[in-house]
Image (tube, coloured by chain):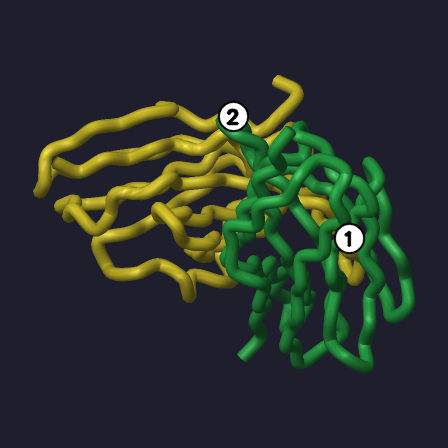
Chain colours: A yellow, B green
Amino acid sequence: GAGVSQSPSNKVTEKGKDVELRCDPISGHTALYWYRQSLGQGLEFLIYFQGNSAPDKSGLPSDRFSAERTGGSVSTLTIQRTQQEDSAVYLCASSPFVSGANTEAFFGQGTRLTVV
Amino acid sequence: GDSVTQMEGPVTLSEEAFLTINCTYTATGYPSLFWYVQYPGEGLQLLLKATKADDKGSNKGFEATYRKETTSFHLEKGSVQVSDSAVYFCALTLFTSGTYKYIFGTGTRLKVLA
């Protein structure tokens, strides 16, 4: 597609269950980012991929959170044993990686996760 | 550490009023600066950017100037419209140690009344 696609758009899950959130970046974009947007809060950085590797995982809030990227394309963010504080909108963005340049990040519509 | 601070909202203005949303940053290197906008029910999209000191980014009547001396990138518009109601995010990017970082502010909600 033309833009960054995230699925599902909405997810309601019970506390303690695992969830997987998917991101399809723009074709050819080598950089991929995950952010979390909580109600009334800004964008919290989670993880950055360059190709399939993740040089910066510093934002993952706990070991319940993990992410992978395969084929330099699709990325999956997995949250294990979900807690109510995980409820938020999870945003994915991609950008073409140009060393030393400053390129725009293109965002998906997000996945709204509600843990009940 | 690297960070972005922007004025808290919400900001409520009447149509045709002048808008300023303040943004300041702290960065160890030479960042590029961005404003993103999130309209209701939509994803974030780039509004404007500036990549070096004294650059001015502009789009849709909005402007922001990269001020290195004051580490600021304030967003301005001379005459706002109801359709400008949205959340505005200031952001910086740094390329450091082989890692590309995007750092966002907390966002400022703008509401424009007819």
Q: Is residue B29 above or below residue A17?
A: below
Q: Quadrant of the C terminus of chain B?
A: top right
Q: Position of residue B105 (x, y in %)?
A: 55, 60
Q: Quadrant of the N terminus of chain B?
A: bottom right
Which residue carries the number 2 mark?
A5
Q: Residue at x 35, y 59 (%)?
A: A60
Q: Residue at x 30, y 60 (%)?
A: A61
Q: Chain of mark 1?
A: B
Q: Is residue A49 visible?
A: no
* Apparent side of residue A70 relative to residue B16 in the rendered image (left or right): left
Q: Position of residue A1 (x, y in %)?
A: 61, 18
Work out whether disc 1 and disc 2 sit on a shared chain.
no
Which residue carries the number 1 mark?
B76
Please name the amino acid that badge 1 sits on.
Answer: Glu
Please name the amino acid that badge 2 sits on.
Answer: Ser
A13 and A71: which is toward the camera: A13
Q: Residue at x 61, y 47 (%)?
A: B88
* Apparent side of residue B63 relative to residue B4 in the rendered image (left or right): right
